[in-house]
Amino acid sequence: MEGSTEVLSQNREVYHVCVTLTLVAIALAVIVLIVSFQIQSNRIRMGWFLVAVCVTVGGLMFRMAELNTSGADGSVYAIYSWMLYSLAAPLFSLYFMETEREEGEEWDNKFWATIQFLMAILVSSFAVFDGSAFLMDVAFLAQYIVVMIMLLISSKSIRASVGFLLGILFPIVATFVGMVNSEVRVLGFGIIMQMLIVFFCYQLDTEREILRSKAELSEKRVSLLMEQIHPHFIYNSLQQISLLCDEDMEAVKPAIINFSGYLRRKFQALTGESMIPFSEELEHVEMYIDLANILPSRHFEVERSFEVTDFMLPPLTLQPLVENAIQYGIGMSEEGDRIRISTVRRSGYIEVSVSDDGHGKVTRLPTQKSYKSVGTENVRTRLGLLCDGKLSIVKSEQGTVATIRIPENTGASKEK
């Protein structure tokens, strides 16, 4: 009698421990869901995180039903719980790979997610057809070992991913506990603790980095303004407009309108919204082209080919590239007289290209005055900070091609 009473007492203790940890896990999951749902940056990444937490909460709810139900119904709830827990690892992998993903690494996402989903199917098969808790624990352990390998191989910085590695230890330890004592199954608590640690050790650091980037962008506005508005170009434009007063009075008014519009766009771009429609940036480009045509420079033609126009981009990203093409591409070359501006939607990105048919080398003509670069690094900085965009410049004997790549989800126009 004493032995059976002791066993019953131990069973009650195990029951209370499992119920308490399950309820705590549900409460923590709700807190994480509320906080993470309010994060606006990178909705794809946060979407995977939210789904992973929701799936785990579903597993916890079935675990609570299992703890409070006996017989066949309890076994069914246990199967549902195992199946939902098995989905947490692949969803977490998608979240991690979206966090670490760089341009050209899309295959990594599919590779690791495929492995994890196959292992989730294996766990679900054990739960439905075998019912062996030990085999399911082994399969779960294998899942999170693969997750750890993924972290070590795919992380851009192990130091930056310490939160991920620490979080993975919780479901691994919880799995070992279940293998030692099948009655103490707290895998859901381990998964939620993993999500909690990852969120606060990594995600909030990412948000702080975004805030620092925004502050850095604000600090650079004044310096960008001085670099982007060149006194040399302004003086030359005013001088040529004054010459037009003697040579062609009818051309003076349009030239002054273009000049004032160009300056207004310049100031608005650097002190206004962080992203603007492509059509507004194109208007600024056209004003610059009209101004460049009244200066005593080489004759040039501009071709335009726009497959897509309904997207947003940072201001002063296209205009400086066109300015470079005019001043450096054909302006400092004895060859070439054509500039081409084009847009295309390709592989989840919107690409904006500016190309010239100069020879791609900086060869100043004998009559060419020194001209200060508009600074492509400023364009790169604005693209990276404002929309996670990229700028690539390729020079060859056939000319120079500058290409902006903006993720389609961030470059999509708000005005549909």
Image (cartoon, rainbow, N blue to C red):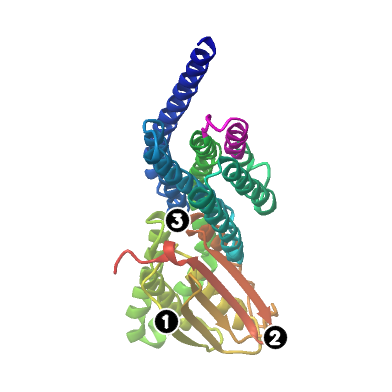
Please tell me the numbered disc located at residue 397: 2
315 or 297: which is nearer to us?
Answer: 315
Indicate left or right for 400 with 414 as reference: right
Residue at the extreme front: 1
- Mark 2 or 3, nearer chain start: 3
**Contact flag, marks 2 and 3 (Cβ < 8 Å):** no
SS for callout 2:
loop
List x then y, in percent, for residue 404. Answer: 53, 70
- Residue at 60 percent across and 65 percent down: it is 107
Start-end of magenta stretch: 167-186
Please tell me the numbered disc located at residue 44: 3
Image quadrant in which you'd find residue 380:
bottom right
Inspect the magenta stretch and tell me whether residue 378 lies in it: no
Disc number lying in front (3 or 1): 3
Image quadrant in which you'd find residue 26:
top left
Residue picked out by circle 1: 307
